[in-house]
Image: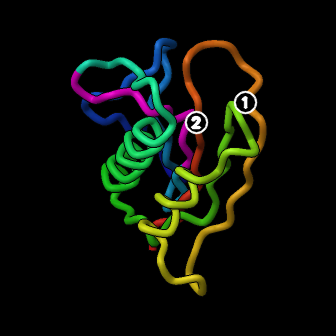
Amino acid sequence: MSERKSIDIPGFKHVNPIPNASMIGNLLMSGLVVGVDSETHKLPPDLDQQCRNMFGHVRSIVEAGGCTMDDIIKITVWLKDPADRTALNEQWLKLFPDPQTRPARQALPHLGGGDALILCDIVAVRG
């Protein structure tokens, strides 16, 4: 059996004692990723910037695990307002411009408290 490895990145840390992601063999799975600013550790007030920050953390997490964005197979996204996917789709198309190679995505309503307008988790398989 492969050994489990914790993945952490600078500028993004969970409040609870958990890593940003965990990896066994070539499989990487993240915890929840939110759009906090890497320097201030605060959430910006707007969805667009939270979304940019969130995907920046996603990129850093997969790269810290030896993966690339092309290794992501699924992203689950939670939105405070599920009807407002403009910022999400804009960033999505920048990250995954080829419709033939995009990861699967599921968007769900974010029912938790707090100021997070968007959050996600990812599954990646290192090629």
SS class, disc 1: loop
- Name the amino acid type tagged 1: His
Q: Which residue is mark 2?
A: 119
Residue farthest to the bottom, as pictured: 100
Q: Residue at x 45, y 72 (%)?
A: 70
Give the CA separation, mark 2 to mark 1: 8 Å
- Name the amino acid type tagged 2: Leu
Above/below status of 60 relative to 101: above
- Dominant secondary-structure state across the stretch colored magenta: loop
Along the horizontal axis of the image, is 34 left or right of 78?
left
Question: Crowding at label 2, few (<14), some or many (≥20) Cα neighbours within 10 Å?
Answer: many
Q: Residue at x 50, y 69 (%)?
A: 93
Along the horizontal axis of the image, is 110 left or right of 71?
right
Q: Tell me the magenta residue range.
A: 29-39
Of 100 and 49, which appears nearest the observer? 49
Any part of residue 6 in sight: yes
Question: Crowding at label 1, few (<14), some or many (≥20) Cα neighbours within 10 Å?
Answer: some
Along the horizontal axis of the image, is 5 left or right of 103?
left
- Residue 87 x %, y %: 53, 50
Q: Which residue is mark 1?
A: 110
Q: Residue at x 50, y 60 (%)?
A: 90
Above/below status of 70 relative to 12: below
Q: Residue at x 38, y 62 (%)?
A: 67
- Residue 50 x %, y %: 45, 35
